[in-house]
């Protein structure tokens, strides 16, 4: 059954990708701004500009451009970046690991924080701790990720400068990474100076991305836990002589997590989308940061490539969500 | 006489309303005591008071609960945790909702054994297997690996009985442990409880709507109405010479043991008016808290 679900998803991915490609293509040619003129600079002659235009195929009719572009896409070729003069695929693969690492780290923080808050609120129901977590949830939800980023930069980067606020790793450290996943790789290769440097730079952008999601998780999990705590099997756990903390953590949490997982997974796609602005704010060299540079420079092939990559990530994530949900719920697994 | 459970003049209110009006009862060691009454009489409240799991709004105004000679009415949370599951256990009413849907059966039997006896994984597992045999579950290895939703209601109730007897408690509270099941399974479950109780010499407080069930498995009984004890004594005495008109009415209307135990049949209107008046008079004498 799960196999058929995956196949259907994969099939649906093609029209989705085609739609994304089409929209991006049209949008980029509708908005004002001439990329070639920007690339050539103010001193360029009209002839030089025409020559460059021909080089990038931008002088041909739109439909022809689109077909050429689609043909390249199917072969996994996103063309050559206008500003960087390197294959777009290469540029994307250079930046992708940074964004993946940031997103996963943020996700882990959000899940950990969200669960801790919901458990604390449930354990201390009716006391000050519960009201504090409610307040935090409301606040965490009201402040968007990029604003958290600015707040952290102001407080921890400028007022009390305890953490570096830009880049991925201290530039004076030399680290040639095979995977691009600095945090994990430096840890397993035992280069702890690199690990600490990477960690200290990823914490704030990750926390900015994580806080709104943590607030959502805390809120949904808390209400889900409240419902579970009313169940007969929780009463039986009390009658078995188990303490309240154990009951919340062991007997209640797993049941309460099922509805939370689906929601968290959907929210994770928003978190990935949030990396674009947050990476920019922290000069974090990921995909999102590069997307903004590409937009500023009107680097059409690069923009197209990054957008398609994000679309691919979202499609893959959604597929993963369906699979995890099926695996987590024993009733779906056996029924 | 050595009473495993002794309740003395227990008065409990919920939001200022009397729900138990000076209830007294005793369960001697190794005996099965029936607690009978119609819906809302306060049977579950008695059970929850003994277990110390009253609803948050409930208040114990006066009275005492003693377990094995020791006062447990206002026990600390910590002391109670050591008692529950080990000294006193519960067979819950609804087997469909009393097992945790997220864990395998094995986990749910083993956890109480490990918690109270600090057993290792292997020892606890062997013990769980032995318990499964004792509650007559066929293919116990397979059942231990299953999740609750994979078992029938009767199987789940057997598992719950195994959990209740796991730590060999001195007192078991059974709150209508068979009403959610169909008649044949009900009978098997009652026989199983009686069998294990007799073998382990456990005291049982057996809560039920069904006087037929009381006649079958109880030694002594208490009839509760609107939170008041209206009849008590040995089962034979109560059945042969019921002291209260309410008990007589219940017996006249009692479904046979092998019939579905729905709510007790309605008692005559004049009688229930009298009983309601008595409860009001009691409240007037004692204050509505
Ligand atoms: N959580 C609660 N909050 C408020 N009132 C309650 C609560 N639980 C029970 N009551 C009230 O306490 C009284 C006794 O209820 P109890 O559940 O003990 O009755 P019972 O004899 O077990 O009935 P049944 O046979 O239906 O289970 C009833 O009047 C009921 O409305
Ligand atoms: Mg009840």
Image (tube, coloured by chain):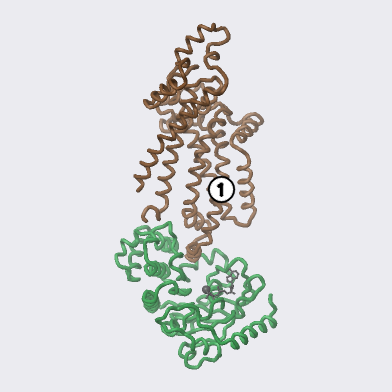
Chain colours: A brown, B green
Q: Is residue A166 above or below residue B39?
A: above
List x then y, in percent, for residue A75. Answer: 36, 25
Residue B146, compared with residue A149, is above or below; it is below
Q: Residue A204, percent across and down?
A: 57, 34
Residue found at the very far left of the displayed protein: B139
Image-based side of A288 in relation to B143, left or right: right
Q: Nearer the viewer, residue A261 or A47?
A: A47
Q: Is residue B200 visible?
A: no
Snapshot quadrant of residue B139: bottom left
Q: Position of residue A281 (x, y in %)?
A: 58, 28
Front position in the image: B53 or B210: B210
Q: Residue at x 51, y 6 (%)?
A: A47
Query: Which residue is nearer to you in this view: B178 or A2?
Result: A2
Q: Secondary structure at mark 1?
A: helix
Please name the residue that numbered disc 1 is placed on. A218
Task: From the top left corner, tell me how far across and down residue A117 is, in percent.
Answer: 57, 48
Ligand 1, by image quadrant, is bottom right
Q: Is mark 1 within 8 Å of ligand 1?
A: no
């Amino acid at each position: 059954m799960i196999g058929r679900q995956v196949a259907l998803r994969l099939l649906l991915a093609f029209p989705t990708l085609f739609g994304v490609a089409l929209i991006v293509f049209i949008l980029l040619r509708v908005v004002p701004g001439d990329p070639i003129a920007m690339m050539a600079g103010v001193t360029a002659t009209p002839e030089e500009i025409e020559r460059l235009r021909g080089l990038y195929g931008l002088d041909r009719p739109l439909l022809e451009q689109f077909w050429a572009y689609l043909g390249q896409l199917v072969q996994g070729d996103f063309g050559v970046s206008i500003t960087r003069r390197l294959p777009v695929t290469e540029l994307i693969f250079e930046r992708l690991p940074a964004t993946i690492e940031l997103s996963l780290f943020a996700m882990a923080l959000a899940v950990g924080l969200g669960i801790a808050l919901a458990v604390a609120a449930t354990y201390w129901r009716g006391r000050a701790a519960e009201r504090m977590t409610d307040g935090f949830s409301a606040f965490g939800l009201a402040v968007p990720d990029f604003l958290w980023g600015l707040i952290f930069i102001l407080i921890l980067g400028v007022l009390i400068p305890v953490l570096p606020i830009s880049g991925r790793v201290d530039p004076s450290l030399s680290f040639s990474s095979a995977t691009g996943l600095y945090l994990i790789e430096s840890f397993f290769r035992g280069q702890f100076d690199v690990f600490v440097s990477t960690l200290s730079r990823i914490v704030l952008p990750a926390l900015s991305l994580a806080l709104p999601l943590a607030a959502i998780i805390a809120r949904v999990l808390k209400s889900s836990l409240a419902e579970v705590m009313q169940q007969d099997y929780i009463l039986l756990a009390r009658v078995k002589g188990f303490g309240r903390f154990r009951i919340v953590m062991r007997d209640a949490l797993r049941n309460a997590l099922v509805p939370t997982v689906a929601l968290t997974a959907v929210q994770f796609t928003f978190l990935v989308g949030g990396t674009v602005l947050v990476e920019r704010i922290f000069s974090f060299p990921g995909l999102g940061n590069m997307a903004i540079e590409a937009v500023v420079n009107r680097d059409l092939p690069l923009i197209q490539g990054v957008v398609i990559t994000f679309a691919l990530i979202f499609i893959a994530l959604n597929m993963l969500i369906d699979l995890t949900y099926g695996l987590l719920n024993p009733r779906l697994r056996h029924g | 006489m050595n009473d495993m459970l002794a309740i003395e003049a227990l008065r409990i209110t919920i939001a200022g309303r009397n729900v138990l009006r000076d209830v007294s009862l005793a369960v001697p060691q190794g005996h099965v005591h029936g607690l009978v009454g119609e819906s809302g009489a306060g049977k579950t409240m008695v059970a929850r008071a003994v277990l110390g799991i009253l609803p948050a709004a409930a208040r114990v105004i006066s009275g005492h609960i003693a377990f094995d000679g020791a006062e447990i009415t206002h026990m600390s949370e910590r002391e109670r945790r050591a008692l529950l599951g080990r000294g006193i256990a519960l067979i819950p009413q609804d087997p469909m909702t009393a097992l945790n849907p997220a864990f395998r059966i094995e986990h749910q039997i083993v956890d109480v054994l490990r918690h109270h006896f600090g057993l290792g994984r292997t020892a606890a597992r062997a013990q769980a297997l032995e318990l499964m045999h004792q509650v007559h579950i066929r293919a116990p290895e397979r059942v231990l690996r299953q999740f609750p939703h994979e078992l029938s209601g009767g199987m789940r109730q057997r598992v719950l009985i195994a959990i209740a007897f796991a730590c060999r408690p001195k007192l078991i509270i059974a709150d209508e442990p068979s009403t959610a099941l169909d008649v044949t399974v009900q009978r098997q479950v009652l026989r199983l409880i009686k069998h294990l109780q007799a073998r382990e010499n456990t005291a049982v407080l057996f809560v039920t709507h069904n006087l037929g069930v009381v006649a079958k498995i109880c030694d002594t009984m208490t009839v509760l109405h609107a939170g008041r004890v209206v009849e008590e004594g040995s089962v034979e005495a109560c059945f042969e010479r019921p002291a209260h008109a309410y008990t007589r009415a219940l017996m006249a209307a009692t479904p046979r043991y092998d019939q579905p135990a729905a709510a007790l049949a309605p008692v005559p209107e004049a009688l229930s008016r009298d009983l309601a008046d008595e409860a009001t008079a009691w409240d007037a004498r004692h204050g509505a808290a």
